[in-house]
Image (tube, helix red, strand yellow):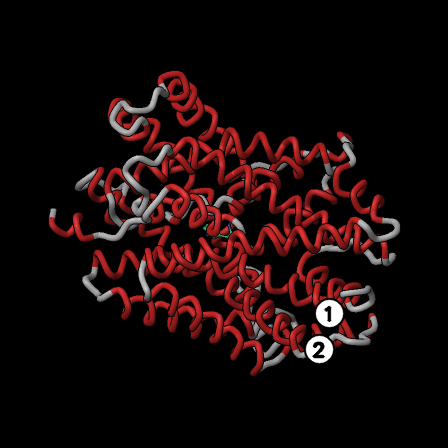
Amino acid sequence: MEETKSREKFSSGLAVFFATLGSAVGLGNIWKFPYLTGQYGGGAFLLVYFCCILFVGLPIMLGEFYIGRKARKNAVGALKQLKPGTSWKNIGIMGVGAAYMIMFFYSCVAGWVYFYLFKAISGDFIGITMETAKAQFGSVIMGPISPIIWQFIVMAVVASILAMGVKQGIEKITKTLMPLLFVLIIICDIRALTLPGAAEGVTFLFHVDFNQLTAAAILTALGLAFFKLSLGMGTMITYGSYFTEDNNMFGTAVKVALSDTLVSMLAGLAIFPTVFSFGMEPGAGPGLLFMTIPLVFSQMPFGSFLLVAFFFLTAIAATTAMLSLVEVPVAYWSEERGMPRKKAAVVNAVIIAVIGVLATLSVDKASMLGNITFFGMGFFDFFDYISSNILLPLGGLFIALMMGYAIKREEVVMELSNNGKLKIAKLVSVYFFLIRYVTPLLLIVVFLNSIGILKF
Ligand code: TRP
């Protein structure tokens, strides 16, 4: 009991909001969301994405908040406490495993972002052409030494922030940087939207085309909702365990989901008008971020400043997301294994950086370790695949089942209503309908599809 008392907490509702949003906003917003939205039918895809957030994302997020705040423990400890002597704790153990898997490759991409920020500040992109942009990206990812060094720098930053603790570390950083991220992204938006031909980019992003709404698009939207909101692996259990007593968790979940989607759309509005205005390919993924952006920004007025702003905001997004990923094992090691928090932060960062090198050295077929494969995937793709396509949906499914069937409804009502202070009777009925029937069913369909058993 004393242990519970001395445990850290966020200091206000605002801190809860920014920390949780900091987890949700990440590399996923800057390229994945805009690119997928453009590819799968713009406005129509967005509509499906909103439904996924509403019917799957929000119920699971609330479930994780409930588990975390009720138990006030790390992902494994919380499940042990709520369901002692059962195997529900394995959701937490799987979550800790998924956190490592995601971090192995996420830290690699974050390293590129830091490197690009450094390059932007030192004026490396002045006068680049299509060829040099490609060559620069190629040499950044092929390294082999520099991407590893940047990956280590990323992990050193993450470990230092986490070592400072929940309030002095996570809370302070997210409260300062998340508002800054909004300012920077809006500056980039203003510039992008006032470029000649910007409308074409906006059209690309938001045109409504229901013909493109295939089964694949729907499944993609569901998977994206999951990854975007940091669900299915105990991140939100861990952060929920630091929430204030009087936090309206329904409200927090809705505000975080809406703001996260807003950031994704603002990112799309900064990227696509720019890409179209310069007649570039709106192609996919890392290429868009790392090759196109330096190229087009270096060609426009105030470009050097905007380039720094853009990579800075991307670095912020990646860093605050990583805080929430690494906090899962840090909280687990320090609470379940009795390791001092500072030591847990450093030890976990070292583990991630060292194993993460495998991902960094296998990004491309031509990379040093590019020819080592598992089920046809290199380390980088393997870590990504196992975590996003298997561990996250499975974790989410179990959380939904636990909330819907293994926990007493009255207990959930008490916790979500802050012991009866909030009037949420109607919301709770809707909640239980979703978490019992709708959410698990949708997840089972996606899961079976992602492991190839169910084909559309
Ligand atoms: N949501 C983050 C992004 O969009 C990534 C992330 C952070 C995450 N924590 C997570 C994804 C937990 C899945 C689970 O980049």
* Residues at circles 1 and 2 in contact by the CB criterion of under 8 Å: yes
Amino acid found under the numbered disc labelled 1: Ser
Mark 1–mark 2 Cα distance, whole angstroms, equals 7 Å
Query: Is 125 left, or right, of 375 in this rendering?
Result: right
Residue 280 location in percent, x, y?
Answer: 84, 58
Residue 88 visible to an observer of this rendering:
yes
Q: Quadrant of the C terminus?
A: top right
> Which numbered circle lies on residue 304?
1
Relative vertical location of residue 444 with respect to residue 287 in this rendering, above or below: above
Residue 184 location in percent, x, y?
Answer: 63, 56
Q: Nearer the viewer, residue 381 or 353?
A: 353
Q: Nearer the viewer, residue 445 or 255?
A: 255
Report helix, strand or loop for mark 1.
Answer: helix
Label 2 neighbourhood size at 10 Å, few (<14), some (14-19), many (20+)?
some
Instruction: Look at 40% across and 16% down and name the residue there.
Output: 426
Label 1 neighbourhood size at 10 Å, few (<14), some (14-19), many (20+)?
many
Q: Which residue is mark 2?
A: 123
Residue 285 location in percent, x, y?
Answer: 68, 57
Residue 325 location in percent, x, y?
Answer: 42, 56
